[in-house]
């Protein structure tokens, strides 16, 4: 039986390190993406088995447009292959698939595959699987604010949250980044406000379900206060302070 999540309902992952993984093995960077894409299906399955409600994966950022065209083409192709291969599993496992970001530059046949899977899985009630593709956190916030302005809606935390690309995902509870860097890289900037962060040195192609489960178990134990303290905690802290002051005086 897999460990079952309790607090960590929305998990987001920055799947980093594909290029370095390949280069360290004297392969071309794209080979890292190929290997990395096979890890994606394992992690999706594991997240589902552990009862994660939403899994959002950073597959292509707005900044990634600056990569060589051949690498961009490979990433497009891997997305298409993944969707073709995983389509039946997604539907069978009651997974709701979505993509956030700008996919207008993807080949037409890939966009159709995406739209078909979105449509056919839209009433599914299980794991919400979302790929961020052509995605940037700042662009998402700007688009939300512009929507509100256009509709003459007051800009509040709640109205911005509701105008994001996929409001039903809610805030991120845990963001994992593989590949050793400790950055957010413009991913889900609004949703991460109170999220837990976990950085691992493991390159994405080496990331396993076992490590994923270990991270979830470890972060589940962290205390999340959302900037608040309970009355009991506050009282306990005051008592300790008074005791320490008393010791100092005597
Ligand atoms: C970062 O590695 C990863 C990406 C830019 C894309 C993530 C893509 C995949 C995991 C494969 C595609 C799979 C699907 C299903 C869409 P990097 O190239 O920045 O690595 P580096 O930091 O070592 O250079």
Image (tube, helix red, strand yellow):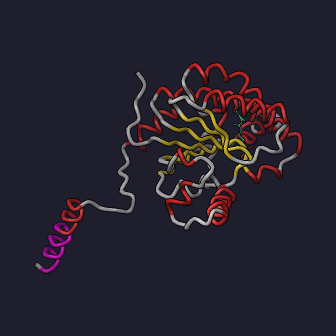
Query: Which SS type dominates the magenta stretch?
Result: helix
- Residue drawn at x 80%, y 45% is 104
Q: Residue furthest bottom?
A: 249
Q: What is the quadrant of residue 42 in the picture?
A: top right
Pick whichever, 84 or 40, lies toward us: 84
* Residue 17 percent across, percent down from the top left: 69, 42
Q: Position of residue 225 (x, y in %)?
A: 36, 56
- Residue 208 in view: no
Judged from the image, the quadrant occupied by ligand 1 is top right
Q: Which residues are magenta?
A: 239-249
Is residue 242 highlighted in magenta?
yes
Relative side of 63 to 177, left or right: right
| Horizontal arrangement in the rendering, residue 140 relative to residue 156 (left or right) | right
Residue closer to the observer: 151 or 6: 151
Quarter that holds the C terminus: bottom left
Residue 94 percent coordinates (x, y): 54, 25
Residue 143 seen in render: yes
In the figure, 102 relative to 153: above or below? above
Residue sitting at 45 percent across and 41 percent down? 9
Q: Nearer the viewer, residue 88 or 118?
A: 118
Q: Position of residue 135 (x, y in %)?
A: 70, 49
Quadrant of residue 244 within the rendered picture = bottom left
Q: Quadrant of residue 236?
A: bottom left
Is residue 151 found inside the magenta-colored segment of the image?
Answer: no
């Amino acid at each position: 039986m897999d460990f079952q999540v309790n607090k960590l309902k929305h998990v987001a992952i920055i799947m980093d390190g594909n290029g370095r993984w390949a280069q360290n093995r004297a392969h071309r960077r794209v080979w890292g993406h190929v290997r990395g894409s096979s890890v994606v299906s394992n992690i999706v399955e594991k997240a589902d088995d552990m009862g994660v409600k939403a899994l959002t994966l950073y597959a292509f950022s707005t900044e990634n447009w600056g990569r060589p065209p051949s690498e961009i083409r490979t990433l497009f192709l891997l997305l298409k292959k993944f969707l073709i291969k995983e389509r039946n599993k997604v539907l069978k496992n009651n997974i709701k698939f979505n993509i956030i970001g700008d996919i207008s530059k993807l080949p037409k046949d890939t966009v159709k595959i995406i739209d078909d899977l979105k449509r056919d899985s839209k009433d599914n009630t299980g794991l919400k699987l979302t790929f961020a593709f052509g995605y940037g956190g700042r662009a998402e916030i700007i688009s939300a604010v512009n929507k509100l302005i256009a509709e003459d809606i007051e800009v509040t935390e709640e109205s911005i949250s509701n105008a994001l690309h996929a409001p039903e995902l809610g805030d991120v509870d845990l963001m994992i980044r593989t590949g050793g860097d400790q950055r957010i890289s413009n991913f889900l900037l609004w949703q991460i406000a109170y999220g837990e962060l976990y950085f691992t040195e493991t390159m994405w192609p080496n990331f396993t379900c076992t490590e994923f489960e270990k991270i979830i178990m470890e972060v589940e134990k962290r205390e999340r206060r959302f900037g608040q303290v309970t009355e009991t905690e506050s009282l306990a802290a005051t008592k300790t302070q008074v005791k320490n002051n008393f010791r100092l005086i005597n």
